[in-house]
Image (cartoon, rainbow, N blue to C red):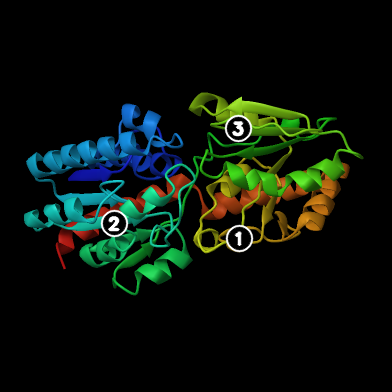
Amino acid sequence: MKVLAIVPYHLDFCAGQRFRIELWAKSLASRGIDVQFLSFMDESLAEVFYQKNKSLQKASLLLNYFVKQFARTVTATKPDIIFIYREASLVGPAIIEKIVRRWKIPIVYDIDEPLFVPYVSPTSGRWSKLKFFSKYDELFKLSDCVFAANKAIADYASKFNDNVRIVPMTVDVERYKPNEASINNEKPVIAWVGTRTNQPNVRLVVPAMNELVKEKEFTFRIIADEEMKFDGLDVDFVPWSYNIEVPKLQEAQIGIVPNIKNDWSRWKFFFKTIQFMSLGMPVVATANGTNLEIIEDGVNGFLVDNEKDWYEKLKLLMEQPDLRKKFGENARKTVLQRFDIERQFDFLESQFNEIKKKGVK
């Protein structure tokens, strides 16, 4: 079976794309499902796109790349299934996505973010409107099957499509596994991992940490794209890379998932939550989005709502190594039961075979 994956980012760049169709493709290949990628962005565009300002340069480049993606799609060889992750182009209406309908083959649309909720990008500002937020409703209607990362997004997609499957984010539990030696380190490490787009969320927990550091010694490890430092805190900034992420997280004792509550975040699947939990790490997270579905408060982590909560729960976990260990074991069990990538591969193989057999709607 030939699958053409039309994706917005170049390979090994975007976490969502990397942990969904890119990861799936590696396993599906051994099951007779060959995935070929058609990427909108490359490294040259990414270098400019995520910088602030440079609006005219971005606009010119985006138009150029839109034309290139259009041409690649028009001249592509007909596959058995079209797979669209998020969008075919980072800007513009659903023109490219509609072109592939000419083949009259099934289209699978995969969405792991609430892209239908308008937002203002911290790097693109008002140019965010060029994403045409209304196109995502069109993509739901256009597709023969929708893969949604969580129930909230699936419920929304179901307004436009009768064939919606919840396909959550998952982790490779053999790669993301606990390092028992780090559990009882004398000076705990509190970890956060993310990208430049969600780094502003980190500031939410800093006031509580500033109070906590007056009583407890700890290191705040930030694994991300852009360096962050905070006065009074022992911040260990680690530039993100694929090879360094897991070893550096394995050295931590507590994972945090702060997020600012808004129209966007309430729909979110917080992947870092299951990353931490797979590593056998207790998680303290804002009570929002899929954190409410994954974290059982007081069992495998803590859900918090304010500065006082952040202070009290982090302090409790730092003071009680046995509690950290218990929460971490429960967290790992949660991931093994619900978010193990190996279990998902069987489901995906059956879905692709069923979708091909059914054909277009």
Earlier along the polypeptide chain: callout 2 or callout 1? 2
**Image position, residue 187 (x, y; %):** 83, 30
- Residue beneath label 2, please? 109
Q: In this view, does 94 lie above or below 361?
A: above
Which image quadrant is residue 181 in?
A: top right
Instruction: Of the two numbered discs 1 and 3 on the same chain, state the one appearing first in sequence.
Output: 3
| Residue at the limit of the structure toward the right, as seen here | 215
Quarter occupied by the N terminus: top left
Helix, strand or loop at disc 3?
strand
Report, in whole angstroms, how far the alpha carbon at label 2 lies from the one at label 1. 27 Å
Q: What residue type is labelled 1?
A: Lys
Vertical order, 319 against 161 (above or below): above
Say the numbered circle drawn on residue 261. Answer: 1
* Residue 183 image offset from top left, x and y in percent: 76, 35
Q: Mark 3 points at which residue?
A: 223
SS at mark 2 in the image: strand
Residue at the spot 80% in from the left edge and 34% down from the top edge: 188
Dot 2: within a 10 Å radius of its alpha carbon, few (fewer than 14), some, or many (20 or more) residues? many
Residue 13: name its quadrant: top left
